[in-house]
Image (cartoon, coloured by chain):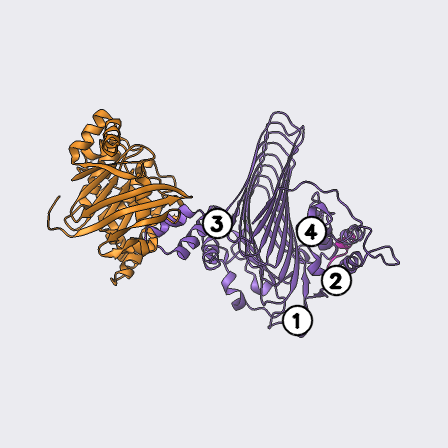
Amino acid sequence: MSIQVSPTLPDVESEVGSEIRSELGLSGSAQKRQACLSRLVELAIASPSPASWLQSLRDRATAQVQSQSFPSNRNEGWRFTDLSDLLGIEFAAAANSSVQLADLAAYVLPEAEHSRLVFVDGVYAPHLSALSHLPATLQVGNLAALAEPDELLPYLAQQSGADELFTALNTAGLSDAAVIVLPKQLVVDPPIHLLFVATGGDPRSAQANQRPTLTQPRCLVVAGVNSALTLIEDYVTLGSGVCLTNAVTEIWLAENAQVNHTRVQRDSLAAFHIGKTAVSQARSSRYIGNALSFGAALSRHHLEIYQTGEQTETTLNGLTMIAGTQVGDLHSAIALTQPYGTTRQLQKCIVGDRAHAIFNGKVLVPQAAQLTDAGQLNRTLLLSPKARVDTKPQLEIVADNVKCTHGATVGQLEADAVFYLQSRGIDAASARRLLVYAFAYEIIDQIAIASLKQTLCQFITSHTD
Amino acid sequence: MISENSPVILSVNDLTVNVNGTQILKGMNLEIKAGEIHAIMGPNGSGKSTFSKVLAGHPAYDVTGGEVWFLGQNLLELEPEDRARSGVFLAFQYPLEIPGVSNLDFLRVAYNSRQKHQGLEELDAFDFDELVQQKLDVVKMDAAFLNRSVNEGFSGGEKKRNEILQMALLEPKLGILDETDSGLDIDALKIVADGVNQLSNPDNATLMITHYQRLLNYVVPDYVHVMANGRIIRSGTKDLALELEERGYDWVLDEAAAGVA
C-alpha cells in the first residue's frame, strides 16, 4: 500500500542530460512521443469536416496541438499517469462498423428508451438512436444535422482549457458531436442518454478495424435560462481490441439552469480513455456531476468547473473502481470567480490488486470569490497490499471570508465490519463483497436513473473478490 | 430458569486470551445450561467485552489456553460464521452501519445462511417477508425499518432493537448481549428487555454483559457473575447485582484480593 500526498514538481519539458540525444537534440523517448502525437494529429485532421465553419475551429486547434508536446511523467500534471504504453501503438481511424441495436441491449436504459443518441466510433448512428419522446423545442442531434452554426459558435470549443492538448486534439478532428440545446424555461423530463460506443477489435467490424483505433467523441450541452436536464454520458466498448477514446464534453449552464449529469466510463480493459468534462456555470445555476470510472487499462478524466456568476451550486460525486493493473486518474478543478458559490465534492476510489488510482483536486478561490462554501473529500479503499493511490487536494484560497474544507482518507476494509457480518453467519468473502458494495453505494445512490443504478450495483458486486 | 437436568450449552474452562501480546482473560470458567440467564458484570477493563467477542470468534483475540465447548462442539475451532450458524449470537455494543444494504436483504442473507447450514429450507423473499413481519412485534419495530439500510441513520435505541430483531430471526441457542443496555433511555430499554424475555425459553440460554444493574430489573438473571482482571471473582444470584449497584465494585475486589492473599 502506498499513500502519497505529493509535493509539486517543476514542469520540466526537457529530458535529463544523461540520456543519449539524437542529432535533432531530442532524446529517444521524446522522439517517440513526438512521433505518437504527430500520428494522432494526422488521424484527427483526416477525419471528415462536415461544414466550412468548423474548419477554422479545427485549424486553430491543430495549431494548438502542434505547439505542445506529448506529456511524459516529467510534467507535473502527468507525474503518476504514464502514457508511454500509447507510444508504440499504430492507431488508425475506425472503419465503418455494423453495430446493431441488439449488440447494445445491455446498455439500453428503459428510462431513456425514446431519448437516446448513439455514436459509434464517434459517428452519429441514427438507426440506433431514438428521440421521439423529446419536446419539439429542444434541439438535439448531431453536429452535422443542426443547421444553425451561429447559435453554437459562442459555445463550441470555447470553454477555458480548450487549448489543453487532448481537448485541442479532439477539436482538431471535430466532425460529429452530440448537441443538446435547451431553450430558456424548458424542463426536459426524460433523461437523455448519450451512448458512445467504441468498436476496437470488434469481430463485427471490417478488417481494417482490427487495428488499434482512435475515436474522439464530442458533446455540447447548452442549457438556457431556467432550463433543466438529466443527462447520462456513457462510454462503452464492443470487442476487446486496443482503442484510444479521447472524449470532450462541454456543458454551459445559463442563469438558474440545472443539469444533472452522470458520466460512466466502462470501456474494455484493453482500452485507453482520456476524457474532458468542462462546465461553465452562470449565476444561480446548479450542476450535479456523477463521474463513474470502471474500465480501461488507463483512464484519465479532466473535470473542470468554471463559475461565471454568483451563487452557483456544484456537486461532484465520483467513483473510480479498478483492479488488475488498471490506472484510473481523476484531475478535477473547480475555478470559482464570484461570491456565494457552494461546491461539494466526494471522490471515492476502490483499488484492488496492483491497480493505481490518482486523484488531484484543485479548488481555486480568488479574492473575488468571497463567501464561498467549498468542501472536498477523497476516500480510498485499498483492497490489496499492492494497490496504490496518490491523492492530492490542492486548495488555492485568496479570499478571506470563505469556508473551505478538504480531506483525504485511505483505508482497508475494517476487520470489525467483516466480523460483524461473519457473526451473522455470512462467510468472510461475502462479507467483504457486501462492504465494498456499501462503500461504493454512497456514490451510486446519487444517480437519478434507477436502471443504471441497478446495473452498476451488479457490476460492483460481480467485480469484488 | 434453573433446572438441574438441563443440558449444558456452554462450558468455558480456564480460558486465557491475549490481545497484541497482553493477557486480557486470565483463566475464565463458566458453565451455562439450557433455560438459564446469566449476567456478567464488572468494572471497565475487566475483560467482559473481550470474553463476548472471543466466544463469537473475533480474529483480533489470541486464545492461548483453555477450552470452550458449545453443545458438544469445540467452539474455538469454528470460524465466526460457523459459530453463528451453529447457534451463537452476539448482539453488538456498537452495531455496524452498512449503507446501501437494505435491512431486509441483510436479515434474509443471514437467516438463509443459517438455514442452509442446518440443512433446512432457505426462504425466498416473499416467504421471508412474512416471517420477518411476525418478528417485528418482538421489538415493536416499524416495518419501514426493513427497507432502510442496515443501521444507517438509526438512533442508538433503534440499532439495539435491530440487534434483537436479528436474534429473534436467527433463534440462537446462546444469545450474548454485549452492553445492550448502554445508551438506551428507559422506554427503549424496556422494549429491548421485553424482546429478550420473549426470546428466552427452556431450550436456549442468554448471557448478558453489562456495566449497570438497571437492565437486570427487566431481564432477571438466574446467575450474576462479577469479572475483574480477566476472571470471574464472584458468582451469585440477582441479589448480588443489587448489592453491587448499592455498594460499587470495590468491596468485591477487596474481598477477592484478601481471599487470594
Please give the letter of the chain rendered in orange.
B
Q: Which residue is mark 2?
A: A43
Looking at the picture, tell me which residue is in the foreground, A151 or B103: B103
Residue lying at the far left in this picture: please name it. B4
Q: Answer whether labels 3 and 2 touch (C-beta < 8 Å).
A: no
Q: Which of labels 1 and 2 is toward the front?
A: 1
Position of A156 compared to A450: left or right?
right
Q: Is residue B256 left or right of residue A326?
A: left
Give the structural element (helix, strand or loop) at label 4.
Answer: loop
- Image check: A157 left or right of A380? right
What is the C-alpha distance between the residues marked 1 and 3? 35 Å
User: Residue B25 in the image: x percent, y percent?
Assistant: 32, 42
Callout 3: few (<14), some (14-19), or many (20+) C-alpha neighbours within 10 Å?
A: many
Residue highlighted by disc 3 = A440
| Badge 1 and badge 2 in a common chain | yes
Magenta-tinted stretch: A50-56
Does A328 sit above or below residue A42?
A: above
Name the one closer to the observer, A370 or B167. Answer: B167
Question: Is disc 2 on the same chain as disc 3?
Answer: yes
Amino acid bearing label 4: Glu
